[in-house]
Structures are given as structure tokens and as C-alpha cells.
Amino acid sequence: MEKLIITGNKCLKGEVVISGAKNAAVALIPATLLLNGTCTIFNLPNISDIKIYIEILESLGVKVTWNNKNSVKLDTRHIASTNSTIELTKKFRASYYLIGSLLGRLGSVEVGLPGGCQLGPRPIDQHIKGFEALGAKVVIEDEVITAKTDGLVGTNIFLDIVSVGATINIMLASVLAKGVTIIENVAKEPHVVDVANLLNVMGANIVGAGTDVIKITGVPKLKGNYIYSVVPDQIEAGTFMLAAVATRGDITVKNCTPEHLDALSAKITEIGAEVQPINGDTLRVIAKHRPKRTNVKTLPYPGFPTDLQSQMGVVLALANGTSKITENIWESRFQYTHALNRMGANIVDHGKFATFRGVEKLHGAAVYSTDLRAGAALLIAGISASDVTELYNLQHIDRGYEDIEGKFIKLGAEMERVEADEKEIELSL
């Protein structure tokens, strides 16, 4: 296992270029399975989740050609299998998109239960509800999901909760179904829109993505040779914006979509920093003073993203006054607060909300990342803290951020990735 040794007390300044969106890419790749042809995807983030997904597609018979580390050509004309191994699918949550794609194109699929960050119960009941409403039979047994159909037929589906995964998965399954499918109470996140855009480019008929209702008119097949670029990663952009605030820095975030970051920009302005739009795809964040206190509630898009909650938690741990974060999406998202308290923060976790009594400075410590976004938050904490921080369990960060330490180093951070021995890992726990 590796660790990051972070020498803190740094003020971050400079420019950073944002990669393609991880949450979009992990849905766009399986979406190509609906296509009887080829598709080249550009602006892919070079992260472990993408590499695993490509490995899964290769195991199914997809011909994969890498153009460079951020672009891949997928030839899906000769899929040889609809079964994916548990060992691969359990490594990350988005593997469940294989169900919608393979069920839609070939009528059967068998995959292992998805894995990923441990953020409390993350059921896929809304996915299954949608598949069954379309005419599939779904069985879960021995950590394996099997779904079969003699033919999917469009219908009306109302999601009991707003779910990004269920919205995309049902949309994937509906593209080649007979008739019209209407999905209500859907997620409106940018990556939902990105997946719909790709499918429409490939010949699907989807309207309403980005609103509360999506209508899919089934088409007989998707075919052709298509090129598509992944939307910029709003969460990576937000991570660097909050890093500027936490370190009282000045960071220009390039290749982002500012309107995707409206909720975050409003909060950053509220706590006393500046957010300056530049040229349509760039935001500059300047933080000259200690942040003010505020309250935050995570909500589905366009509300404040749960995937930026822990990074905002670092900022509020350093704010002047007492703040409160209410987590409305994932109940175990506050696991990172225990590590911040080891670094001198004063945070009380109450389950669905946490109270942050701001301190003037954090100090270095040995801390352990519990999930992807917690890892990013602790990295920011280490950069802003005094002394040295040792951050363990880097595989979580590698799942969702391309070259994150390289980008932070260019902004003035000081850190090094090294091997950690077993005794160090035990102590960090």
C-alpha cells in the first residue's frame, strides 16, 4: 500500500486544467454496449475506475484501441459474453450500468453486485423497479445479479427517490425497448445529460434530460462510427475551488462548466472568498481571509453536491465560527470528520448532520482515507495544515482523480507518494 507524505502550511496559487468527469465516463463507457459499431471517446479521465471498466468490456468481447491515455476507441460489434466477473464488478459501484446496457441490447446479463466506497446502504431497488417495469426478470443470489427478458417494452416509471444511477440505468435499458418510456422524478445531474447526449448522437431518441421527466422513444438499433468528448468534471473543479479557500490561495480552474458549479460558487462567495468567471470555461477563486461560518445542505443537482461535502467540511473546520452540514444523500459521508479531528479540528458528527466549530489551524497527522471524496478532503487538509501529514489508502483517490498530486504540486503543494509498510498502516488506523 502507498501513502502520501504531505508537507503542509502551503498557499496554493496558479492554474489547473480539469479532466473529464469520472461520474459521466463510467456511464458513457457501458452505454457504448448498446451500439452495434464503434465509438471513440475523448477527454476520459485517466483513473483506475475507467481502466477497470475497459477491462470489463474487453472480457465481454469489445475490441479496445487506446489512442492516448485520455482517448479510447470501442468496437462493440462482436460481443461474445453478457457475463462479467464478480472480481471486477465489485471494485466500483458504477459497474451496475452493465445491466441496463446488456439487457437493452442482448436481453440478458449476469454481473456481480457492485462495490465502491462504503457510504452506508446504497440499494439498487429503483434500478430493479425500472427493469421489471420494462419487462425484465431480475434475480439477486449469492452476490450475483441476473436479468433476462424476451423483449423490453416502454412504460411509465416513477422513481421513489431521485437517483442518478437508476435514472441512467433505466434510460440505458429503454433506448432499444419497443414504444415509449417516460421516467419521472429523475436526477438532473450534468452526467445524466451527458449520457443522454451520447446516446442521441448514436441514434437514440431521448428528450428531457436535465429536467424532472425524461422521455425515451425506442429505436430498433444504434449503429455507426461516432466520436464523443466527456463533459468536464464538476467535482474535480469544485475540489480545487475549495482547496483555494482552505489554503487562502488563488487558483484559476480551467476547462470547467461554470453553471454546473453555481451552488458551490454561491457558498464560496457567502463565506468571503471571490469567484471570478473568465472566458466561459474558467473560474478563478481568490481567498484572502479566513472563511466565514455557514450552513450547508447536500441535495440532488442543482443543489450542493454530496461529492463536495467532505471538501467543504475542511473549509468549515477552518472557518471563523460554528457551521453545520446536513447530509441528505449518503448517511456515512461524515467518516472523514474523525480524521480531521485527529488533525486538530473540532467536529461533532450527529449522523445526518455535523457541527463544525472552526479552528484557526490544523496540524499534521497520520490519517486514513475512507472513501474517494474523503481522500481528496484529507489531502486538502494536509496541504493547509502545519507540519507533515501522512495520508493512507490512496486507492480511493486514484479511483476518481487523475494525477491529483501532480496537479496540486504545480499549484505549490509539497507531497510525495511512497510505499507504506504494514506497521505504518496499522498505526494510521
Image: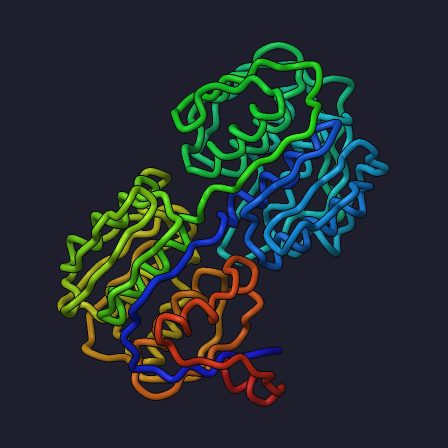
Q: Is residue 417 above or below residue 248?
A: below
Q: Is residue 252 left or right of residue 191?
A: left
User: How many numbered discs?
Assistant: 0
| Residue situated in front as seen by the camera: 348 or 191 | 191
Q: Residue at x 39, y 74 (%)?
A: 339
Q: Is residue 414 above or below residue 44?
A: below
Residue 33, how many percent across, how many down? 71, 34
Q: Is residue 44 left or right of residue 219?
A: left
Q: Quadrant of residue 11?
A: bottom left
Residue 29, how many percent across, how many down? 64, 41
Residue positioned most to the top: 179
Residue positioned most to the right: 80
For the N terminus, which image quadrant? bottom right
Q: Residue at x 76, y 25 (%)?
A: 107
Q: Residue at x 80, y 47 (%)?
A: 59
Residue 204, how many percent across, how many down? 60, 20
| Residue situated in front as seen by the camera: 70 or 208 | 70
Q: How is the image coloured?
A: rainbow
Q: Is residue 302 left or right of residue 333?
A: left
Q: Quadrant of residue 364?
A: bottom left
Residue 111, how many percent across, how many down? 74, 43
Q: Residue at x 82, y 41 (%)?
A: 61
